[in-house]
Amino acid sequence: MRRKVRSHIVQDEPLLFELSTPGKRGCQLPRLDVPAVDPAAALGEGSVREGIEGFPEVSEVEVVRHFTRLSTWNYAIDLGMYPLGSCTMKYNPRANEEAARTEGLLWAHPYQPEEQVQGCLEIMARLEQALAEITGMDAVCLQPAAGAHGELTGILLIRALLESKGNPRRKILIPDSAHGTNPATAAIAGYEVENIRSNARGMIDLEAFPSLVNEDVAALMITNPNTLGVFEVNIARIAEILHSKGALLYMDGANMNALVGWTRPGEAGVDVLHLNLHKTFSTPHGGGGPGSGPVAVKKELEPFLPVPRLKQVDGQWRWDYDRPQSIGRVRAFYGNFGVLVRALAYIMACGAEGLRAATVDAVLNANYVRKALEPYYELPHKEPSMHECVFSDRRQARHGVRTMDIAKRLIDYGFHPYTVAFPLIVPGAMMIEPTESESLRELELFVEAMIAIAREAEENPELVRAAPHSTRTSRVDEAAAARKPVLRWRPES
Ligand SMILES: *Cc1c(COP(=O)(O)O)cnc(C)c1O
């Protein structure tokens, strides 16, 4: 058993402001060979400023080293695994980045005439078709910029459909195993949220469910697989019950990494679903960069999709704005185009067999971690795991070591922490999603680190409680950082 703590590079790097020496320059401009102009005369008095108080004056090499050193404090997917559950933080093949940087795609402008951007429109049309096929749905809208945005679009579509039938209804049912964005979405769309308790298997209780669905219920929002990593096996029956009462089934498809190529939500009776292209379909995420949350719907909801819609006229792609029942736009232009290119490149590079294989590997990796850690950590739900597994810190808590401490200690072992204390229905949750992109070797290192930490929790709990030890700063006051952020350096401070 290797118990090696991977070392981090920790330089004693000051703030850029503290590196400043008056008069230093990062670049040299050639001597002026034209007559000098008075800036105030040329630009107007109000456009000229004296200088910036406290502006750092540093040389080129100081700037380069400063930011390069800072970058070594960052953890990145190019450095190691991100076991964050419910996030699908996977390594994305570089080839898809290349595709997104193809010159004609990179520089296309959303206001270019349609006949000049037929290739871009074709990419979007093909992606819509591919996602419809993968999900078993009838139509796809690529506009929403993220998962939560897709949810909002989806629930507004449900509202519009029910309204067209005379009554938008009042309530949305949401299981306690759903992602936190689901109740937020329902509330923003003007619905009351009714929470449904999961049964001991981490699923909806089919005995109790029918009595919850009445004339007030617009839809059930279900995350499948849910945040316990458990697949809702009764989804088709649940859809039937909802439909028999005139309600709809919304599926949060952010966890499609566990399903692609093996099961199609549309065939299980799902009416609306969103995907997270920045999770399942090859756009890096976690840095706050562009995302994409396409919404897929059944035929009945298609007339309400956001405008414009792509349509083919005489072999040419056109934008169709003439859709009187549409809920309108949900975003400027047509979605985050670069993300769409990556997704189509990924789907086409994998092909049907490749996508199925990725799903199998994602599920296999999660179950490998689960089996390997079961002797050391409490597993509250015994259902088979899909793309992620959820442990609780119950055994370690007896020594005063909680999920946050274990997560912090993982940093010393060179791993990004797993998802801490979520889902809420598991006290002291430790939610782990390795994804398909991790090798057996990397999984073994992770498992060894987790086992070593379990031992430390028994033999030396103080060590774990004070982790991380290998970073420049250890525990920060997160509440104070959020409530009183210091965003600006002041010379006097
Ligand atoms: C990530 C996630 C979301 C939200 O997606 P964003 O792109 O972060 O808005 C919703 N549901 C589930 C299950 C998720 O994992």
Image (tube, grey):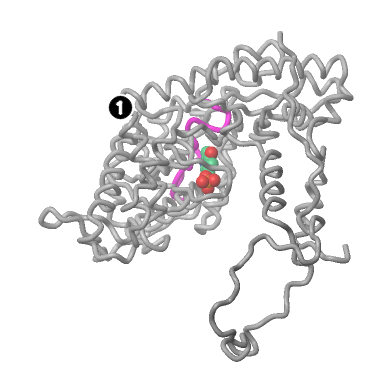
Magenta highlight on residue 226 = yes
Q: Which residue is mark 1?
A: 352
Residue at x-position 50% and y-position 36%: 223
Q: Is residue 354 above or below residue 185?
A: above
Secondary structure of the residue carrying tag 1 is: helix
Q: Position of residue 92 (x, y in %)?
A: 47, 34
Q: Position of residue 430 (x, y in %)?
A: 68, 28
In-image side of 428 versus 107 (left or right)? right
In-image side of 252 versus 340 (left or right)? right
Q: Quadrant of residue 96?
A: top left
Whether label 1 lies within 8 Å of ligand 1 gets the answer no
Total number of numbered discs in the rendering: 1
Q: Quadrant of residue 376?
A: top right
Q: Position of residue 197 (x, y in %)?
A: 59, 34
Q: Dot 1, crowdedness within 10 Å: few (<14), some or many (≥20)?
A: few
Which of these two is toward me, 15 or 40? 40
Image quarter (top left, top right, bottom left or bottom right) of the N terminus = top right
Q: Is residue 329 above or below residue 175?
A: below
Q: Is residue 264 above or below residue 110?
A: above
Q: Quadrant of residue 269?
A: top left
Work out which residue is located at the far left of the displayed protein and give it: 314
Residue at x-position 42% and y-position 60%: 330
Image quarter (top left, top right, bottom left or bottom right) of the C terminus = bottom right
Q: Which residues are magenta?
A: 211-230
Magenta highlight on residue 201 = no
Q: Amino acid at mark 1?
A: Ala
Q: Position of residue 301 (x, y in %)?
A: 31, 51
Residue at x-position 69% and y-position 53%: 63
